[in-house]
């Protein structure tokens, strides 16, 4: 009886991982074998099959559309920034032209209302009311002592260094906008001076989406710096 051992069966099938690794190392494979590229077909989302070339064209077209949308978004942001820069420039000129505290506060009120299209706004300055008797700008302007209990709802904001945007608490809205509080959907709060030592500016909108936590704060910070610098002159 023969004791010769039968040879082990060896599979000639190449694994998918091996194909993947080979193509990854040789990305020009299909350039050297164009006929193979055109003969490959892939399942399509709408049914049937398409050639690999058609699939690549489809993928590239989708990427182009995505890049177009991204470019459009960037252009829209750039245009919006240009508009904001122009408004800040206009505010700077208005503040430079003022000669006293009353005209300065009036210029701030006009810029916030007309230039920045605020539905409601109020400038809060810290101090004694007797020190600001000459200022006559209606309900836009208000003076209060920094340690007044009415400011407790703003304690966290006053202790921060960046503006705050979004929906405000009822106690904050009631203090800022009084009878019009229920109409305000979102608010931007801007510190004036280091650690809000001068006060703060509140800009209210009837839209709940106008001011939101995800928006850039650079613009509001610059407005706050300009207003604070102008007010410090007096």
Image (cartoon, rainbow, N blue to C red):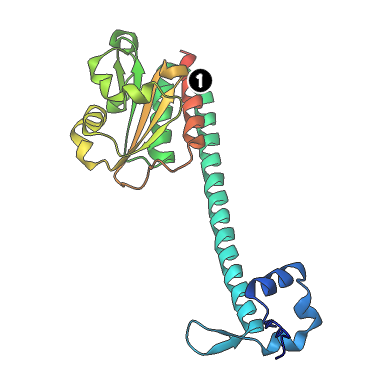
Name the side, left or right, on which 89 lies relative to 214: right
Residue 59 in the image, given as x and y percentages of width and height: 60, 74
The quadrant where residue 20 appears: bottom right
Which residue is farthest left? 179
The quadrant where residue 170 appears: top left
Q: What is the number of callouts on the image?
A: 1
Q: Residue 85 versus residue 46: which sits nearer the camera?
A: 46
Q: Is residue 185 above or below residue 189?
A: below
Which residue position holds label 1?
Answer: 229
Q: Check disc 1 and report its element: helix, strand or loop.
A: helix
Q: Residue 139 versus residue 84: which sits nearer the camera?
A: 84
Rendered residue at 35%/15% (across/down): 126
Crowding at mark 1 (Cα within 10 Å: few <14, some 14-19, many 20+): some
Name the side, left or right, on which 151 lies relative to 87: left
Which residue is farthest front? 1
Give the quarter of the figure containing the C terminus. top left
Residue 32 in the image, given as x and y percentages of width and height: 81, 81
Q: Residue 131 versus residue 152: which sits nearer the camera?
A: 152
Rendered residue at 50%/25% (across/down): 225
The quadrant where residue 100 appears: top left
Rendered residue at 78%/79% (across/down): 31
Give the quarter of the figure containing the N terminus. bottom right
Residue 64 in the image, given as x and y percentages of width and height: 61, 69
Q: Residue 207 versus residue 92: which sits nearer the camera?
A: 207
Which residue is farthest right? 32
Rendered residue at 71%/83% (across/down): 5
Q: Is residue 78 above or below residue 63?
A: above
Residue 161 in the image, given as x and y percentages of width and height: 45, 25
Q: Is residue 234 above or below residue 159?
A: above
């Amino acid at each position: 009886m023969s004791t010769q051992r039968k040879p082990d069966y060896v599979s000639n099938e190449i694994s998918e991982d091996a194909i993947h690794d080979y193509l990854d190392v040789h990305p020009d494979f299909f350039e050297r074998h164009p006929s193979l590229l055109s003969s490959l077909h892939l399942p399509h989302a709408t049914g049937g099959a398409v050639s690999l070339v058609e699939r690549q064209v489809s993928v590239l077209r989708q990427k182009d559309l995505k890049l177009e949308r991204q470019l459009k978004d960037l252009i829209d942001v750039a245009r919006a920034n240009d508009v904001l820069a122009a408004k800040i420039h206009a505010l700077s000129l208005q503040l430079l032209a003022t000669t006293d505290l009353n005209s300065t506060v009036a210029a701030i009120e006009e810029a916030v209302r007309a230039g920045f299209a605020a539905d409601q706004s109020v400038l809060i300055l810290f101090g004694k009311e007797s020190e600001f008797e000459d200022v006559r700008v209606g309900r836009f302007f208000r003076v209060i002592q920094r340690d007044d209990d009415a400011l407790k709802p703003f304690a966290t904001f006053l202790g921060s260094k960046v503006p705050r945007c979004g929906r405000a608490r009822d106690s904050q809205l009631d203090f800022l906008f009084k009878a019009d509080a229920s109409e305000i959907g979102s608010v931007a709060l801007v510190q004036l001076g280091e650690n809000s030592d001068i006060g703060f500016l509140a800009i209210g909108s009837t839209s709940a989406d106008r001011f939101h936590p995800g928006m850039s704060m650079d613009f509001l910070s610059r407005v706050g710096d300009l207003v604070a610098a102008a007010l410090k002159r007096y």
